[in-house]
Each structure stands twice: as C-alpha cells, then as structure tokens.
C-alpha cells in the first residue's frame, strides 16, 4: 500500500482516507481489512486516479462501474485489489460518500496523519462519524469512541462541543455524562430508549441511500456494463 500512496502523490490524486482505516488511526477501532478512500469527483482527478492505479498494477475486484465521472458523482463504489505482501490489499473508492458534504469542505477539515504507508490525509472526526452511520451495529460503537476521542482532545470542552457529543454518541453512559456536564439530568434508561429508537432510523436512511445505486448497478450488470473482475486498471480510462 505504501507504493500505492506514493503513486497517488506522484500522480497528484486528491483523496481522503475514510471509514475503517481512518477509525483505526484515530484509535476508535482496532482492525480493518479494507482500505477505503474518498476521491475528489472531477474528471481530471479520475484520470490521475486511473494512472496511479495502473502504475501499481491494480486490478478490478468486483461490481465496479467504468471509471467515469457520472458514476463517481452518483455515489457508486469502485473496488480493486493492489498487489502486496503477504497478499493483495483490497481498495474501495467512493466519489460521493453518504451523509457528508462536498469533498472540498471535508478536505479542509481533514488531518494529515502518520501511518505505516506514509503521511496521509485522513477525513476529520465529524465527517467520519457521518460516514459510519451505516446499517452495521458495530459502527455505532466506533462512532461513540470517536465522539469520546474528539471531546478528549479539548482540556475544557465548550458547550457547543458537548452538545454535539450528546447528540452524536450512541453509548448511553456517555450520553448521560455529556448531559451532566451541560447541567442537564438524563436518566440512563431514557438515554437507552433514545438510542434504541435512533439507530434503526439511521440504518433505514443508509439502506434508502444505497437502494437506487444498487438498482443502477444491477442494470449495468445485466447489460454487461461493469468492468470485468480481474482485469488490470488502465491509465487510458476516460472520465
């Protein structure tokens, strides 16, 4: 993966590390298999991405549309394998992730962090929390860890930060604590009831977001419009 990110740097690819690996870097999770990236959805940047992937001998993994701008802007995922040791790395790329704003706005809030693959731009905690509101229950524990990390970065958290933490955490004990620090009394049972009703709503929104994308992906598959699994990425992909 170090070679991949060096190739990105040489090609000038604009991207952010997101999801599982970003959560690991912040200390909110302990393990993630895949590498997930948010790539700026512009024609020029997609061309740079294709060139960088080709230079690293990346191959299409599965269910990947052509590397063209309209599919990046629609929110499709692009899936690749990159040669490595002891085995290939799995790379998932999005041009328009759910529940966050524009790439430019998120890039301004991102952090550059030291990793085993070099210094990489990592999506900010607030945007990472938006990305993690999926249908997987485990992600809500990760979100709660991220909230606690964000609050802990300030020696004296502002009321605005504490209100944000109270709203975003999905751990009942933490919600009670943030309410107390704001001068509010919140019973543990009430916090649990709130969380129990909020998580299914976020899960439903996640499913609704992906439904039209999956529908279009199936249509592409039926007419043979997906990139064949196993083929190498070529630098001549045209946005």
Image (tube, rainbow, N blue to C red):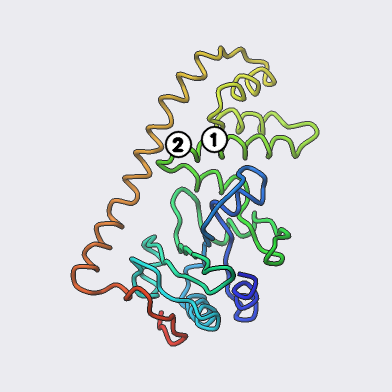
Q: Position of residue 199 (x, y in %)?
A: 43, 32
Q: Is residue 70 above or below residue 35?
A: below
Which numbered dot is residue 141? 1
Of 1 and 76, which appears nearest the observer? 1
Q: Can you identify the residue that label 2 sits on?
A: 137
- Callout 2–callout 1 Cβ contact below 8 Å: yes
Residue 10 falls left or right of residue 20: right
Q: Residue at x 19, y 72 (%)?
A: 223
Q: Is residue 107 above or below residue 11?
A: above
Q: Position of residue 144 (x, y in %)?
A: 58, 34
Quadrant of the image containing the N terminus = bottom right
Q: Residue at x 48, y 77 (%)?
A: 58
Q: Residue at x 58, y 49 (%)?
A: 31
Q: Position of residue 211 (x, y in %)?
A: 29, 51
Secondary structure beneath label 1: helix
Secondary structure beneath label 2: helix
Crowding near the residue tagged with mark 1, few <14, some 14–19, many ≥20 C-alpha atoms within 10 Å: some
Q: Residue furthest front?
A: 86
Q: Position of residue 54 (x, y in %)?
A: 50, 82
Quadrant of the image containing the C terminus = bottom left
């Amino acid at each position: 993966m170090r070679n991949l990110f060096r190739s990105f740097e040489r090609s000038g690819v604009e991207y952010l590390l997101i999801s599982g690996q970003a959560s690991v870097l912040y200390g909110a999770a302990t393990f993630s298999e895949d590498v997930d990236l948010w790539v700026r959805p512009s024609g020029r940047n997609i061309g740079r991405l294709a060139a960088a992937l080709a230079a690293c001998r990346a191959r299409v993994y599965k269910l990947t549309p052509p590397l063209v701008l309209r599919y990046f802007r629609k929110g499709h995922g692009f899936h690749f394998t990159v040669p490595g040791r002891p085995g290939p790395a799995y790379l998932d790329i999005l041009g328009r992730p759910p529940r966050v704003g524009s790439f430019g706005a998120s890039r301004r809030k991102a952090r550059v962090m030291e990793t085993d693959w070099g210094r990489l731009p990592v999506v900010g905690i607030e945007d990472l929390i938006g990305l993690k509101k999926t249908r997987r229950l485990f992600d809500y524990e990760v979100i709660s860890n991220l909230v606690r990390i964000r609050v802990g970065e300030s020696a004296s958290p502002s009321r605005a930060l504490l209100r944000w933490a109270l709203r975003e955490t999905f751990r009942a004990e933490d919600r009670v604590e943030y309410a107390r620090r704001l001068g509010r009394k919140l019973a543990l049972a009430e916090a649990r009831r709130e969380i129990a009703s909020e998580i299914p709503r976020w899960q439903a929104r996640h499913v609704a977001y992906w439904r039209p994308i999956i529908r279009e992906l199936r249509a592409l598959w039926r007419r043979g419009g997906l990139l064949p699994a196993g083929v190498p990425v070529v630098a001549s992909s045209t946005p």
